[in-house]
Image (cartoon, rainbow, N blue to C red):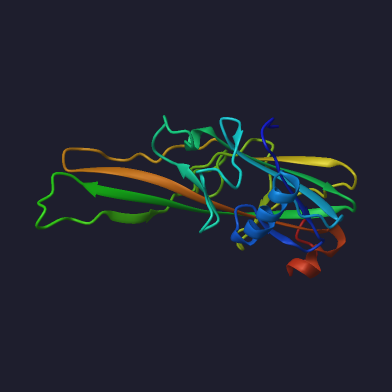
Amino acid sequence: MFSALKRRIYLSLTLVVLLFGVSLVAVFAYFQTQEQRGIIIQTGDFEVEVFASFSGVVVDYNSPYYNRETGTLIVNAYDSLSSNYVGNLEISVEITAVVPARMRMKLQEQWTLTRTYLDQDPLYPIADVIEVVYNSNHGAGYYPFSLLKIPPTFTPIYDVDGYAYMSSIIPKGVTTTFDFIQSGDPYIVKNNEVFTETCFLYIDLMIDVVQANRFSEIWGIDPNFYN
């Protein structure tokens, strides 16, 4: 999908992978030194490649849009001229399995609005007001309770545990691609003679892949979940 640097992750049968998680920091630092490539963890059971990009430029560990301390992707949610603008965001996942597999993913996002007051009295300054913004459910075409958009081909089963379960079994020996996020709507900020506002989105994506016939046992869900 992208011609730029790819980040490749190899999973065991029950390994949970945080795409932007701090658990991968040491692993990436090691393999970048040894291989001069992206994140690589190899077990031989599954191969997962996750691509997050802005206008086709893939975000890697050294990108200014990756926060190493928090392990999150930083997205500008208000300024269409910024390089990491939400409208230019794409995330996709590719999986190659050696056995039939099931996959679920959890998108964890925080929309943070910051209000800065102008022309303040230096003796009585007003601190920035920072608040977390919660979105309503925008229905079809959007990830639940988010301004991020999903393509028509992304049709998971959403559950109360916050995971999106891929509805079909991933066949063995075949690379299956899930186009996950394709753009997003900006958060409308306010700017006037009194204050200015900015809004940033912080994303953490968790992927969980298991052997297809063990999903109920490992995930602790009903054996008839997919029926």
| Residue 181 visible in the displayed image | no
Q: Does 84 sit left or right of 8 as displayed?
A: left
Q: Does 4 sit left or right of 86 as displayed?
A: right
| Residue 88 visible in the displayed image | yes
Which residue is at 81% across, 55% downward?
42
Q: How many marks?
A: 0
Q: Position of residue 211 (x, y in %)?
A: 84, 59
Q: Nearer the viewer, residue 18 or 189?
A: 18
Q: Where is residue 11 in the image (x, y as percent from the top left)?
A: 78, 56
Q: Where is residue 58 in the image (x, y as percent from the top left)?
A: 61, 37
Q: Which of 161 and 110 is in front in this view?
A: 110
Q: Nearer the viewer, residue 1 or 220?
A: 1
Which residue is at 49% across, 37% downward?
84
Q: Is residue 164 above or below residue 160?
A: above
Which residue is at 27% across, 40% downward?
190
Q: Position of residue 102 (x, y in %)?
A: 79, 55
Q: Quadrant of residue 199?
A: top left
